Amino acid sequence: MPQQEPTTTHRRTRLSAADRKASILEAATTVFADVGYRRGRTAEIAARVGVSEPVVFQNFGSKAALYAAVLDQVADWVGTGLREELDTCCGGSVAALLDHVLAPGHIDRMHARGNLGALLADAAALAEEPSITEAYGRCTRRLAEELTALLAQGQRAGEIAPGLDPAAGAWWLLSFVASHRFRGTALPEESRTELEDGLARLTRRMLTGDAGPRTAGN
């Protein structure tokens, strides 16, 4: 998945209602990706935009609703990012895109604080907030649809295993990425890197039917 680092812009000029809402959403994405939902403060988000904290609530209603709106936008960003990487970095090859996504250390970097993987991982653990749970489900399903389309495209090009169900492959890949935090907690540190790389190679072989891994650096 692309390692998009959300950015925010300090705006002090008067904004239209639509621009103000977009700016709040942008700042919220940065704050939540940096420190998580529970530690993220709406006061900090407001300060980044240059508005008062009540303006944040006037636009989104609650902190949970703001986080849910961030998740809805993340699905668009990640889907667009995957397509851009496919075209610009991978020469239109879905297998090469998989190599990039599954390259050693890439998923670790995706989940580092400040990146969207960390934001999605936080969302998966916020079961006490129904609106966030619903938004996380929508986001994940949209990502699964995008990955399904990409795998089907690769299948037509002969890069993905012909017998693979693209939807099942998409959910397998998402499950592998989403379980990063579980593996980081459970795997012994001395063998974690080796096991992570082995799991990535196994995932690639399952999706492509190719016994030879082509992860970056190999």
Image: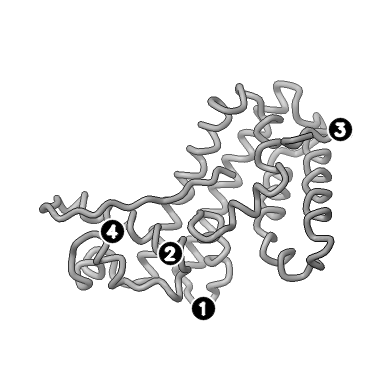
Q: Residue furthest bottom?
A: 128
Mark in front: 4 vs 1 = 4
Residue 128's disc is 1
Q: Which residue is mark 4?
A: 24
| Residue 69 placement (x, y as % from top left) | 38, 59
Instruction: Name which of mark 4 and mark 3 comes first in the sequence.
Output: 4
Label 3 crowd bin: few (<14), some (14–19), many (20+), radius 10 Å: few
Question: What type is the residue that disc 2 sits on?
Answer: Phe
Q: Which quarter of the picture shows residue 189? A: bottom right
Q: Which residue lies at the image location 77% right of the left edge and 70% below the top edge?
A: 186
Q: Earlier in the sequence, mark 2 or mark 3?
A: 2
- Cα separation between marks 4 and 1: 24 Å
Disc 1 vs disc 3: which is toward the camera? 3
Q: Is residue 95 above or below residue 126?
A: above
Q: Disc 1 or 3, which lies upstream in sequence?
A: 1
Foreground pick, 154 / 2: 2
CA separation in Å, label 2 and label 3: 39 Å
Specify whether 35 is left or right of 127. Answer: left
Alpha-carbon span between mark 4 and mark 3: 46 Å
Dot 2 and dot 3 residues touching (CB under 8 Å): no
Question: Which amino acid is tagged 3?
Answer: Gly
Q: Position of residue 102 (x, y in %)?
A: 71, 43
Residue 33 in the image: above or below residue 125: above
Q: Is 127 or 34 nearer to us in this picture?
A: 34
Element under label 1? loop
Q: Which labelled disc corresponds to residue 212?
A: 3
Q: Horizontal and vertical percent for residue 106?
A: 65, 47
41 left or right of 138? left
Q: Is residue 64 left or right of residue 14?
A: right
Label ID, residue 32: 2
Q: Residue drawn 45% across and 70% down?
A: 37
